[in-house]
Amino acid sequence: MYDYIVIGAGVMGSSTAYALAKEGKKVLLLEQFPIPHTRGSSHGASRITRTAYPEEFNGSIMAVANSMWKDLEKEAKTTLFKHTGLLCTTSTLHKELVDTQKTLQRYNTGPVPIIDSAEISKRYPLMSYPKEEKACFDFSAGILYADKCVMAFQKVFQKRGGEVIDMCKVQHVTPGDVVTVHTDKGDFRAKGLVITCGAWSSEILSDLGISLPLQVMAIQVCYWKARNGVDHSRLPPFRSIDGISTKYGMPTSEYDGLMKICLHYGVLCAGPDMRDNTDSKAEAKNLKMLTEFVASTFPYLVPEPAIKERCMYTVTPDNQFIVDHHPIHRNIVFGAGFSGHGFKMAPVIGNMLAELVQGGKPELLVDELRASRFDKKSKL
C-alpha cells in the first residue's frame, strides 16, 4: 500500500508527487497516456511566467513560485527558466493595469511605471499599438521550458523513491480510510488520493459525487514568420488585453525565427477526447481576430500563421483554478480548472495539494480558489 496516489502526471500532478516524496512519503503517480505525450495541457517548449496579476492572491502565489522554480533547477541540475521580463498592455482595462502595477510593486523591487503607446514604440520599434494603449513591465517574468519542467519534477520525484506508471487508465475510485484506485493495470491502495487530471478531471470527480463548473476548450497555438527575415528574437514576451480578448506571445524556442502569438481563448469541445472535433466556424472567427491583431501590432510579421498546433484549457467561470478536498472524504483532494494560466504556479500548487491531502491548511489557499465559491450552499 502507498501513502498517497496522484492521478495525472502533468505539471500539477508531477509537482504534487514530488512535494509528497520530498517529505518521505511512499507515492505512486499514475498517467493514462505514455510519458511524455501531447494530449493534455502541460506539453510544449514554452510558457510565460509572470507576477503581473490584478489579483493580489495570484501575485502572492507567484512570489513564492518564482523562487521554487529556481530550487527545482538546482535539484534537477537543468535550466528551466529564461529571464526576459513581460510587457503588459491594455487599450481599455486601465483599472486592471493599475491593479497589476500595484501587485508588481508589492512583489518586485523598484518602481513599475505605466507607459503610453509612444514609449512602447520607442522601446520596441517592431511593435505598433494604438494611441490609447497603456503598458507596464513585469521585471520578474520570463519563459519556462514547459516540457523540461515536467520532466524535472518527475526526475527528482523518482530520485526520491517515487513510482510512476504510465499508460494506466483509471476506471473507478472507491473512497474510504484507505482509498482504492481501480485501473486497467490493477487496483492500487493508499491512505490518500490527489486528483490532477486536467481536462479529464470531471470524469473522475463526478464518480465521487463532485460536480465542478469545468469546461474544456481546444486552443489554437500559432507561430508567425517574420517578413524579410526581420529579427524579433529580442522582443520580450507580451500580454495584451482589450476587454474582448487577451492575446499573448513571445519569441519562440520551438521554431527558430518564428514568433508564438496566440489568443488566450478557444472553442468549447464536448470533452478532452474530442479536442480535434470542434466548431470550425468559431475557430475561423478566433483566428481572424488574432490575424487582425498580428497585422496591426506586428507590421514586420507575415499576418498568416506559419504553423498551427493544438492545446487544451480546462476553464472555470471566473478563470481561477480550484484546489480543495472532498466534502466527506477529506483524504481525497483535487486541483482543476487552471484556465490556461496555472502552469507557472505548479510548484506552489503541488505544495498546496500535498499539504491538503495530509490534513493541513495551506497558507496561500484563499477562499477565491476553493470550490465552494461557485455554490455557497454546496458542501464543498
Image (cartoon, rainbow, N blue to C red):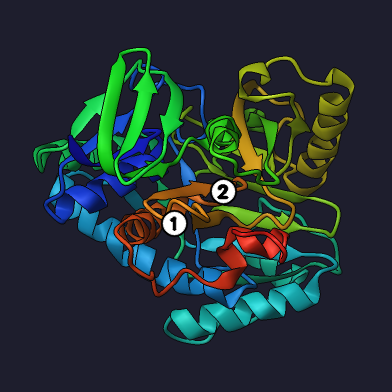
Q: Nearer the viewer, residue 245 or 25?
A: 25
Residue where numbered disc 2 is placed? 338
For the residue pair 335 and 309, the one nearer the viewer reads as: 335
Residue 238, horizontal then vertical, whole percent: 61, 55
Q: Quadrant of the C terminus?
A: bottom right
- Checking the image for residue 232, the label placed there is none
Q: Which residue is mark 1?
A: 345
Residue closest to the far front: 176
Left or right of 251 in this view: 27: left
Task: Report the residue at 49% width, 54% height from top.
Answer: 328
Where residue 33 sits in the image (x, y, percent)? Answer: 41, 18
- The residue drawn where x is 32% and y is 59% is 351
Amino acid at circle 2:
Phe
Q: Is residue 229 visible?
A: no
Vertical placement of residue 287 versus 13, above or below? above
Q: Marks 1 and 2: CB-CB under 8 Å?
A: yes
Q: How many marks?
A: 2
Query: Residue 217: percent from the left, percent from the top?
Result: 70, 33
| For residue 86, above or below residue 176 | below
Residue 40: x and y in percent read 51, 28
Q: Is residue 95 left or right of residue 358?
A: right
What is the three-letter code of the residue carrying label 1?
Met
Q: Earlier in the sequence, mark 1 or mark 2?
A: 2
The quadrant the N terminus occupies is: top left
Q: Residues within 10 Å of mark 2 (few under 14, many from 20)?
A: many
Which mark is nearer the camera, 1 or 2?
2
Q: Secondary structure at mark 1?
A: helix
Q: Give the Cα distance between marks 1 and 2.
A: 10 Å
Residue visible at 52% across and 87% down in the picture: 111
- Rendered view: 174 above or below 310: below
Front residue of 12 and 287? 12
